[in-house]
Image: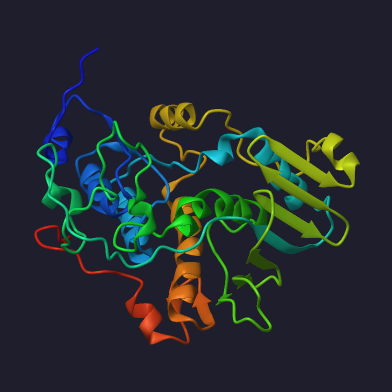
Amino acid sequence: MECAAYHDFRELLARDDIDAVVIATPDHWHEIPVIEAAQAGKDIYCEKPLSLTIAEARSMVWAVRRYGRVFQTGSMQRSMSGFRFACELVRNGYIGELKTVTVNIGGPSEECYLPAEPVPDYLDWDRWLGPAPWRPFHSELAPHISIDIYPNWRNYRDYSGGGMTDWGAHHFDIAQWGLGMDESGPVEIIPPDGKDYKVLTYKYANGVTMTRDEANGTLFTGTEGKVEVNRGYLKTWPDSLMRQVIGPHEIHLYESDNHYTDWLQAIRTRNKPICDVETGCRSVTVCHLGNLAYQLGLPLHWDPVREQFTNCEEGNRLLARSRRSPWNIG
């Protein structure tokens, strides 16, 4: 099977014989292709993390809704049975009242000070940067695919949120699912201060506390038990919860055993898939909030309805970033 290759993604979007697209570009190149694809009438699968900023995530939700598209966020752990079962145990109260969630992921990204290197002949560096600020090429950011299929652009703030978003879009996403927060989020985010808060801490309006700390994936702790889940790993306290059957009248979460198949089925039915754009937006917002708390170094009070900080104007200014011309929107 031969596939066409394009220098400009907009040429692909202009084709009438294409119904849906998969966007698996670096994080700083998610928002614009998503919006353009929605405007072109394409259904969309976009890799996680959904966005580079909170404002970008919200603009993607707007575009998908405005143009009536089916959208799947690539947080594929929702299509793995162990994660679903863990969240159903939590949501149905099998560990008692949920008190804490512990999530084990990498840290935030940082500023990029890599030295300049010659741009290789095979790369259009200006287009790779796209809406990101101009900086000289360095092979750590965009190595040839034969050298590294997992390049380090994820470590730098202009292109990614680091491990906080890369793995947070998986494990924070499961935390949000277990919390029943797919349309909301935390109300306070506290960076580690070396005293009262040893680790990054989130507080929810329902009294649950979530921390970035040691766990095997995501650990839910309640008044009567615990459940810890990761890929290929599930453990409960007490052990008997492993054999629990969720009853017919209890909460059953959306069931999918293949993230891509689920998206294709949703395209046919025009229903929302398991990880709709709003879900992806809310989960990546949790990641970005943590990064902003690290960056600003102070507790942040967050209104998940207005999606604004109530105590930090500097934080509100950092919810969005300027785009390098000509990659402006609107």
Q: How is the image coloured?
A: rainbow
Give the quarter of the image for residue 24.
top left
Residue 226, placed above or below residue 5: below
Residue 316 coordinates in the image, percent (x, y): 37, 79
Q: Residue furthest top?
A: 1
Quadrant in which the C terminus appears = bottom left
Residue 241 coordinates in the image, percent (x, y): 86, 42
Quadrant in which the N terminus appears = top left
Give the quarter of the image for residue 42.
top left
Question: Do we see residue 92 in this rendering?
Answer: no
Residue 173 coordinates in the image, percent (x, y): 55, 52
Give the quarter of the image for residue 157.
bottom left
Residue 17, placed above or below residue 153: above
State left or right for residue 89 relative to residue 16.
right
State left or right for residue 229 relative to residue 3.
right
Is residue 64 or residue 217 the one in the foreground? Answer: 217
Is residue 66 or residue 256 the one in the foreground? Answer: 256
Question: Do we see residue 275 in this rendering?
Answer: yes
Is residue 226 or residue 105 the one in the foreground? Answer: 105
Q: How many marks?
A: 0
State left or right for residue 129 relative to residue 255.
left
Q: Residue at x 35, y 36 (%)?
A: 149
Residue 245 coordinates in the image, percent (x, y): 83, 35
Residue 188, placed above or below residue 125: below
Q: Residue at x 41, y 34 (%)?
A: 270
Q: Residue at x 42, y 49 (%)?
A: 277
